[in-house]
Amino acid sequence: MAQRQRPSMDRSDHGHEPDDGQDPIRGRDSPSIGSELRDARLKLGQELADVASVLRIRRVFLEAIEEDHFDQLPGAPYAVGFVRAYAGHLGLDADEVVRCFKEQASGLERPADLAFPEVITESRIPRGAILLISVVLVVVAYGGWYYLSAKNITISDIIPAVPEKLASLISGKEPDAPAPDAAPTAEAPVPEPAPEPATAPAAPEVGAGEQETASAPVTEEKPKATAKTPEPAATSPPSPEPAATRPPPPETASTGTPGPSSRGGADAMSGATAPADEGGGEAPALPAPEPFASTLEALAIAPASQTRPAAAVPTAPPAPTKLQFTGVPEIPGVPPRSAALPERQPRVYGEGNSDSRVILRATRDSWIQVHGADNVLLLTRILRAGDSYRVPNRNGLTLMTGNAGALEILVDGQPVPPIGPFGAVRRDVSLDPDRLKTGLATAN
Amino acid sequence: MFSRLFGMLSADMAIDLGTANTLVYVKGRGIVLNEPSVVAIAEIRGRKQVLAVGDEAKMMVGRTPGNIEAIRPLRDGVIADFEIAEEMIKHFIRQVHNRRSFASPQIIICVPSGSTAVERRAIQESAESAGARRVFLIEEPMAAAIGAGLPVTEATGSMVVDVGGGTTEVAVLSLGGIVYSRSVRVGGDKMDEAIIAYIRRNHNLLVGEGSAERIKNEIGSACPPPDGEGRVMEIKGRDLMNGVPKELIISERQIAEALAEPVSAIIEAVKVALEHTAPELAADIVDKGIMLTGGAALLGNLDYVLRHATGLPVSIADEPLSCVVLGTGRTLEEMKTLKNVLTTSY
């Protein structure tokens, strides 16, 4: 590109010839570019106003350039442009003047900061605070969940049990509830009182040995007992006379007590402990309540006429003790089981399902979930060892368990084949009693 | 995150795709390429192939045999020949972009403020097919103002006149935006054409584009010298009367006459822009004046003519030829803060 020349700059207005050949700036140690420009202007005999009118640069800016007050100029690019125009007008080497000007005026090389006007953000919750709060909430929620799960507390545990006062107000439910509760342990309470009557009547027995043995064959149906004591049985006919001679209470007692107590006959204690075993407890258990009932009936009738004499006679006490026994067995029916797990009461879920055919009982801790036919969740929880669940008598129930081997399944009271080994997870196990019995419950 | 990673791996570039010259600024490296926007195409066995691009191709302009064609794919600031322009951009990008960097670059390209959406789309697509990861467009007057160092983001009016090869852009800028802009398709090319036409008309001599450009650069002036003929220059061409090559001497005054029409078109554009400027901005411009950028700003006395016509101080930017690419490059460097000035048609 050709060097720009400005001979026309000075034409009409000033009429002087620019001397292109010489450069007034070069070769001089000029500290100030402004004074150089002023010298050049004065040399040409021009007024500042004339220059301002030709270059259209305002006079204050030209003065600022001449006095080196570069900060008064409108901006770096304009200042350079003004100096270039001024130098060209004066016939100086514009590029050289601009180079010197840039050296002297500091900050011209630095480009102007370009900062776009920012949109004012509306006031709102700062993002950092939202983040912090959400983190705290998450930590609290997790901590709470961890605490509850670590202590094995479920929501149902937190809810307090119904107070007894209120429980008694629930009219229809209350009598029903204990009935099934006692049912599974029905065989237990019956043998239980057995030893006690055995020992309790032992006291009167000492006094009336023949009477007891004599009365035994009367109620005893076991052939064994009858075979064992044929003589006493034979001798029994006379014994009722002495018994009869005695006041009536012993009579009532003799009708009631012999059932359990006489079974052992000679070995009363061994006979008493034997029924305590769960194995063969049922056979003697069934006849047992009947004598109790009969004693109750007898007591209900007999005392009406003979309570007074009974109280007078020393053998009377057995009767009241009998009363206690008849009343007591039903309440302490559970204790024998709780003795095995002293620290925790086994729970029975689904107690309301009186018509239940299937009972799930956990021998070890096992998580179970029972769904209804339309996938309605009936129960989901961990059955602790000993807990049981009475499955409602409905069709289409399915079971999911986390430990199949720990579940003992009873159908109509009879154990059925296990649905899996210990620790096995089983899903969609049908709780249909027939399928459970055949062991096909897990096969879908 | 990925964009930052790619940014490190690729050489992002700013391109001033000018009618006359193409300049490429690479992030962190400055201006790395400044070549004429000319492509030489050879037709070999029926297939067109790129023979040369840039300086080499410009030497061939007007001197090519039948099978070679030296083409300027841009006319009036916009792409006239889409395929050739794409080849040229590809060539420049390949020349600049490091082959080892496997991420394709982000590219900012200038477009004239008066270009249509179709023209912008054409420029953007040719850059994309040339291998750009993402293409942004920036309006030329804004790039020129940033390159000239004007305080475009301040609440003060700045006027920039960018006289390029194909177009002249006049714009008033304030608060980071273009308040008013006007683009006339007059520039260096039109001046060359005017010189050719003048010499043919007055001297019956036909000169080439290259010669005309040389005349403009050496003795070109926007106004005739105050007295006499001014500088003179020998020119060579073909005599239209008898068809033989001829040499003659032409003066500055004659060229100034020849250039009167394009120069007056530029002045007219500036005046119209000033007429449309809001009074507050006009008051700012009275103080600071007009900033002249672009290659044709180096035409002798153009600033004087403008000053005379408008009555405003006129300054020529420091490096008028590279103002646009410097401004585009600065936008590339400060992408975060200057993103507002970029447009993209995604």
Image (cartoon, rainbow, N blue to C red):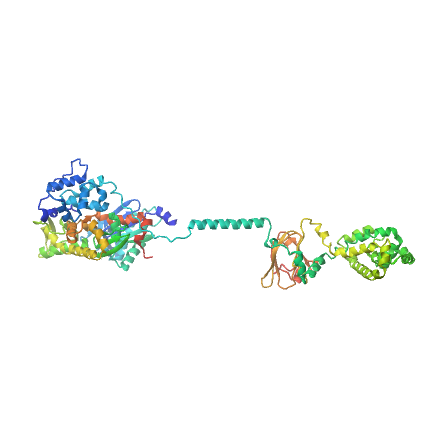
**Percent position (x, y) of residue A311?**
84, 55
Residue positioned 54% across, 50% down in the render: A144
Q: Is residue A336 above or below residue A26?
A: below
Quarter of the image containing the C terminus of chain B? Answer: bottom left
Q: Is residue A223 visible?
A: no
Q: Is residue A245 left or right of residue B79?
A: right
**Percent position (x, y) of residue B155?**
27, 51
Image quadrant in which you'd find residue A326: bottom right
Pick whichever, A113 or A61, lies toward us: A61
Residue at the farthest left position? B228
Pick whichever, B232 or A165, lies toward us: A165
Q: Is residue A127 visible?
A: yes
Image quadrant in which you'd find residue A92: top left
**Percent position (x, y) of residue B257?**
11, 54
Q: Is residue A419 left or right of residue A39?
A: right
Q: Is residue A269 left or right of residue B40?
A: right
Residue at the farthest top position? A29
**Percent position (x, y) of residue A288?**
79, 58
Q: How many marks?
A: 0
Pick whichever, A429 or A379, lies toward us: A379
